[in-house]
Each structure stands twice: as C-alpha cells, then as structure tokens.
Amino acid sequence: MSNPATVASPRTVANKSEKPALLGAIRMALEIESPAVRHNTQAFNSGRYLATAAIPDYDRLKDQARATKEAAIARLPELLATLEASVKGNGGNFFLAKTGEEAARYITKVCTDHQARLVVKGKSMTSEEVHLNLHLEAAGIEVAETDLAEFILQIADEQPSHLIGPAIHYSRERITALFKKRFQTDLPLDTGEELTRFAREMLRQKFLNADAGISGANFITADTGSIVLVESEGNIRLTSQLPPLHIAIAGVEKVLPKREDLAPFIELIAPSATGQGLASYTSVLTPPMQAAPALSDSPVQREFHLVLVDNGRLQMREDPVLHEALYCIRCGACLNSCANFQTVGGHAFGGETYSGGIGGSWEAGTRGLLNARFSELCTGCSRCVMQCPVRIDIPWLNSNLRERINECDLEKSGSILEKAAAAQFHAKAPLPKIFFGRYDLFGKWGSRLAPLSNWINNLPITRALMERLVGVDRRRQLPPFASTTLSSAARRLSPSKASSCRGKAALFPDIFTNYGSPERGLAAIEVLRSVGIDLVLTEVSADGRASLSQGLIKTAQQQAQRTSELLLKYIREGREIIVVEPSALAMLRLDYRRFLPHDVFEEIRAHSFEAVEYLWRILQERQLNAADFFSAFRHPLGTRLFYHSHCQQKTIGAAAPTEEMLRAVGFDVATSGVECCGMAGSFGYKKDFYDLSMGVGEDLFNQVRATEAEGERRTLVATGTSCQEQLHAGLQRKVFHPMELLAAIRATAEI
Amino acid sequence: MSSISSPVRQDLLLQFEAAARSAAASIERVPYSAESLAAAVKRIATGRIAIAETLDLPPDLFADLRKLPGLVRGRSKEELAACDVGVTEAFAGVARTGSVCVAVDHDYSGAISLLARMHVAVLSAETITERPGDLFNPRYLHGKPLQRNFVFITGPSATADMGPLVRGVHGPHQLHIIILE
C-alpha cells in the first residue's frame, strides 16, 4: 500500500500519455475505486448475459447492425450531406465541426445569442470530449449536468470512468460524503432514495428555469433528420423538450442512412448496455417539433441545432484498422465483460473521455496516439469480442495501437541496447515487448540450457536484472523451462497402439506446452491414444500468440503463415489438429482470419480442436460412454473439482465440452464465473501490472474459497497455462490440466 | 368493440403484461368504454390530474375522464410539474419489453407523461406488437410511427447512479398501464 498522500486524483491522471501517469492511475483505482467499479460492472455484465440470451435472433440482429454500420461509415460524407438537407428541411440548424474547439465555440455562441444564462445538459461523452462545459462557463453560462452520474462528476470535478455509467466508481457512501461536503445540508442523504430525491428536487428547478438544453444523440438518421435518445432517468427527455432551445451534439459516426435502419440498434443497445429489454426511455424525435409547441409553454417556434463533431473521426475512417472503432454504439458491453476493467474502471483503463477496450481507439483517434497508452490494459483475453453488438474486434484494435505505440516509444526513449535488440529481432518495440513477444526463442534456448537456465533465472541478481530490463515482476514465480520438451519426450513414447482407429489427429506442440509444461501435452497424447486415436506430433512452430499480444504484428503474421503451412500438411492427410494451450488454439480459430486468406483460415479453423474438446467429440460421434474409459471414481484425488476455463477458450466455444466431459465421467464440477483469471498470458508477469493482475485474480480465488466453504476441498483444474500459474500463485495449490486427470484415471485402470 | 380473438394476439397480450410487470409497471385490463376507463383511473389516481387529448383513439373515449375531480386544464410547465397524475394515450405497446409508445408532441403528452409522479398510459390491446423494431416497419400501424415524435416508455424512470436501484428520478415514480380490450 502506498502512502495515501501520494495517491493520485482522477483528474491528475486523466492524461495517461506518459507511463508514470498510467501506473499512478492503476494504484489510485486499486486503492479507492475498485470495490464500486467491480460491483457495478459485474452487475451490468450478468444483466447483459441474461438480457441478450432472451433475444431469440440476437446473432442476426448483430449481423444486421454490423452491416448497417459498415455501409454507413463507407458512405459517411454522402450521408452527412443528406442529413444536413433533412435537418434544414425540418426547420433545424446543422453544423459540422471540424474540431472539438469549433464545436464548443459554435454551441457557446448559439447559447449567448439566446442570452442563455442557465443550460441543462443530458449525458454526452462527445460534449466531454470537446470540453463543452469549460467553454460555456467561460462565457458566464451556468451549466447544470442533469444525469445523476454526471451531476456527481460535476460536483467532484472528475472525468467519466465508464461510457454509460460515468460515476460507477462512486459507492453510495462516497456520494453521501461528497454531497454533505459540497451542499452543507442537514437533509438525510444516507440512502440511494434520499440522495436521488435531493438531486431530483434541485435539478427540477433547473429544468423549469433553463434557457437551453444540450443533449447527445445515440443514433441519427440521415433521411429524416431524426435523433434517438436512450436513457433511464428522464432527464434527457426534459433537456431536449422543455427549454425553448435544444442543441444535440454527437460524433459524425452516429449517422445511419434511414429511420427504418434503427430497428436492430434499438433492440440491441439496452440489452448490451444495462441488461434491460429497453431503457426506461428511448425517444425517437425529429426536431424541432413543429406540430405542437410540445413541452414549451410559449407558443413560439422551438429552435434546434444539430452539431456533429469530426475531431479526427473522418481521419479514423481512412485508417485501415481504426475505422472499425467508428461502428461503436457506446453500449459499454466491452467494458463490463473485461476483467481488468471490472477491477480498476475507466480512470485507470481509460483516457480523458473514453474508457475500456474500445476507448483506446477513440482516444487515439480524437486526441492522439499516445493518449491510448492505457490500452496496454487490454490483455487480448477476447471476452469482449462476442459481447459487442456490432462485432468490433477490440483486441485486434488494441494490438495495432500497441504496435504503433511501441514504435513511438522505441524512437522516443529507446536505449542503444533496445534499438539494437529491435534491429536484431526485426521488431520496432521496446525490449520488454520483444522479450514477452518472442517466448518462442527464449523458450527454445531456456529448454536447451535447462536446468542451468532455471537455476540462473531464479538467482536474485537475475530477477533484479530481469525486472529492470524487461519488466518481469520479481514476486512472480517463473514457470521453469522444461529440460525435456514435449516434442523430444514424445519421440520416446511408443507409437499409437492402433487396435481400433477411432480418429486421426496431429497434436500441435504449441510453444507454451512444448517448452513450459510438456506434462500436459504428454497426458493428452496418452489419453487420446488410449481411446484409439491415431495421433502424431507436428513440428514445433510459434503460432504468433505471444508476438501478437505484445503488438509485434509483423512477426505474428510471419509466424501465422509458417504455422498454417505446417498444419495444412497434416490436415490434408486427413488429420484433425489438436492444441493443448487455448490461447494458441484461439489464434488458429479466431485471430488467423487477420493473417491468412479466407479459405485457408476457414480450413484451419474447421479442423482445429482443444484436446478435451476433440476427445469428447470422438466419444460422442462414436456413441461411446465416456465413463467406461475414464470413471471419475477411480481418480486418486476424488471426484470433487473446481474447473476454471481459459478466457479465449470460452470465446471460441471450447470450454463447454470439457465441463460436459468431466461431468459425464462422474466428476462433481464447480466452475468459475470470472471472465479471466487476470494472468492473461504474460500480462500478470509484468511488474507494471502485477498488482492489477492479482486484484483480478482475487475474484477467482474467492470463488474457489466460497465453493469450498460449503463442503470439502476440490481439486483445482484449469486448461490454460497462465490460469494454472495464477491459481497456483493465489492459492498455493497444485493445479491440474483436465487431460492430467483423465490420464491419472487411465493409469489406475492399467495397474 | 374489438376483442382479442386470435390466439397469437392473446399470446402477445400476456407477454406484454408479464414484461411490463417485470419492468416495474403496474397494469390492468379494462373494458373498452369511456365509463370504465374513467372508473379505473379514479380508483388509482388522487390529486391533480392532467389528461392529454387522444391520438388514435376516439376523443370521446376520454370524455368521462375529464369529469374527474382535480382535473388540470393548464399546459404551462409549472402547472404540469405540479400534477400528481398524468394520463396519456399510448398508441402502441411492445410485447417483448412491456413498453408503451407515447407521441410526445401531441397535446403536451411528453410533459404530461413525464412531470407527474404517476403516469397512466391508456393502451388499446390491438396495437400491441411483438418487438421494438416493429415501430420502424412501414407496415405496422400503416407506417404512422415512422412519422411521429415518440418515446418508448418501459417502466418508471430509474437510476442506479446513487448506488442501489431507485425508481422515480426526473420522471414518474409509477407507471400504470390500462389496457383497453
């Protein structure tokens, strides 16, 4: 714990373009904001799983929304022209602001032209982006933030920490303390009800007296000039309809071609965001509302301005990678499903305005590349990928940001040693990135030199040097290099006893299994051969996961190319590819679409399996009873398990088969409910992120403890290597791979 | 008048009721007549009541409502903000989410449905459609929703910004839906 006096405040670490600010922000978040963020994001997250599961055509809606967004961004300049004509035709005003500054100035001028003294505002991230309040206040205009979360932030002078719940880092207790200090009131403010009533009454007066209302817009339709406003409090309805002047500010990317296009978005946004079918209020308006003076008590024509902000977006549109971020509908699903975000929130995992996995691209696009440094907190665990209603590949965006930031950092502050290493490894990145990204080389040499290399690695002097040079935290136990790699150990095994050939497969010794934990691979080989699989081993090849995760994209591309050529040879011999390490399998099944021609990718994807997934499939196909082969009751450690599936394994749908298989053979399986263990490959080994990684892990450790509190101890089981390390670090107990369990059962059978 | 006859629409009605309740709205079915509507509102509403004009429903359906004590005729925002109950027509209902759709610029329906502590939405059973996206389908209600300024209302206004979930923020604390059948 650091001294509280040194703990940063959110504002001072809003700009995280330099690394010390990022590290300070993580410390602050872990010390102050973590419990509230965790509670709120996890509530959103479980709500979303329930709500989206209740939509029968969820996948079709996502496809439809994605296609509409792709087309809209492709046609954006044309749509902006159509929209301008529609808004003007409706009797409104249209302004396209090139920069944030221009947008803020325009709005301030509209307000001063109206002699506005009090402006009510609905929540708008775009208005935060352009620092609108500062401009309005400098012109002597009072700004009342009316969304209760924004109201809190305005009082506390903090930036938002979440796209849709900007004050989720505040617990009720902290809000009470803040209000008591700010308002010096004797009114009771000790419950959510009391705080809400207090704010409602204060803000009701603001609404009734406001001269102008400023809102954002969730969607805008070019053909009709309509805007959609999604909210649950009612403040945006009041903001947009009560005062005589309404200004809506939004990024240019919010424009859709037609009003009819709104259907899938309306159905996706609330379930994805808050886990509701629809938010309390979803307004579809075509302002200015002329038919009746609506909510205004004066019969005069109401005035409407639509201010669209470019501020780097049209340049993002030209970017081969970042343009995908423009499809974002700001639902926050990627934030809520992210284990790191759940632990620190957007004041650490976020920039001045935009937060979470998607936030990096937005900060890079609207403020500049280095403002996306916080995207380093994206571990690539991929849990957000299936949650995004427009299917944005957020880890891919972040890997690309990492590549660009690596290059910047190397040029700006790389030492001579680092530059030499970068040249040697053909990767423009600082040394720590190369170290973690090229585990294929370090693993290879480490294994060749083991056990000497392990002895050297664990010397205090080595650990101190490693911490300084490549950023490996010395509190982490390093997984030892295997002196006998999987590929050399497997050569000594007798070949398949093919009494009855039930399937042909080739096990791909991924670098983590091969150099780090060959025993898992050996167990898989034994088990698969024991059920009659004709199994061979492929050559060792780096699949590209390690390099991709560090932003060494060109290296990953080359590795993917080589690995795919290797695997295709076996696939074309009629063999399925078996992978032990889920992160390597996820490369083959998910990430290779970025690196390989579509047909090659599809062929590899269709023929790659996690080891237990393949076994379960063979047993099912052949209608064999799994318990006949692997009765759990023969396992020496008993039948009670706690199984934690790997993040990427869940994303590619390879977690459920293991759970089914383990249950089918008679194990009593408790499963973890966390998105990720927090180790996330190399992330948790890094000195900069050790505390965060352990903070994330705490959820998992607590689940194990809670499950065991109800009964006896359970054998810990994990499919991912790094999950295994993390569970071991947190609970100091041995963790098994599912194949090791099955192999142990076979061993008792053979005795 | 019309009743729900086909089994599909009965399904939608039941689905609508369940969804609206789980969104924390209260709900009741009332025979399609001015008399029974007024009686239903009288049972739940006390204090100052603002009543918006009907939109698609025949105007005389609201005639008896206007005889209720406490009727507020003024339309200034101060007068509407001081009301206890606001009654509006909902021109559509959404079965999947339990939402009602209100045309906000029709006789102050936006303010009437928002400023009072209780909003009573009057919905004709036959307008209930399956899903929110239907409101953007040109075939639904002859495409009228595509021309309207409206709001999907799903339960009372709510927030979790102050910690626990609280109902009744800037909008009503209670949403009561009266289904006419």
Image (tube, grey):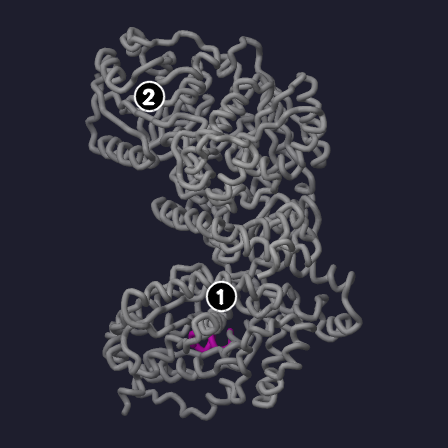
Q: Is residue A473 above or below residue A516?
A: above
Residue A112: x %, y % from top left: 69, 20
Q: Give the camera-side residue of A652 and A550.
A: A550
Labels 1, 2: front one: 2
- Most extreme residue toward the right is A416
Q: Is residue A573 magenta?
A: yes
Residue A339: x %, y % from top left: 49, 57
Q: Is residue A190 above or below residue A735?
A: above
Residue A388: x %, y % from top left: 49, 49
The image quadrant of residue A744 is bottom left
Q: Amino acid at mark 1?
A: Ala
Q: Circle 1 sits on which residue? A: A586
The image quadrant of residue B41 is top left
Q: What separation in Å lies between label 1 and label 2 (alpha carbons)? A: 52 Å
Residue at 62 percent across and 43 percent down: it is A353
Q: Circle 2 sits on which residue? A: B120
Left or right of residue A125, residue B157 in this image? left
Q: Amino acid at mark 2?
A: Val
Q: Chain of mark 1?
A: A
Residue A63: x %, y % from top left: 46, 47
Residue at 42 percent across and 22 percent down: it is B114
The range drawn in magenta is A568-577
Residue at 51 percent across and 25 percent down: it is A202
Q: Residues within 10 Å of mark 1 (few under 14, many from 20)?
A: many
On the same chain: label 1 and label 2?
no
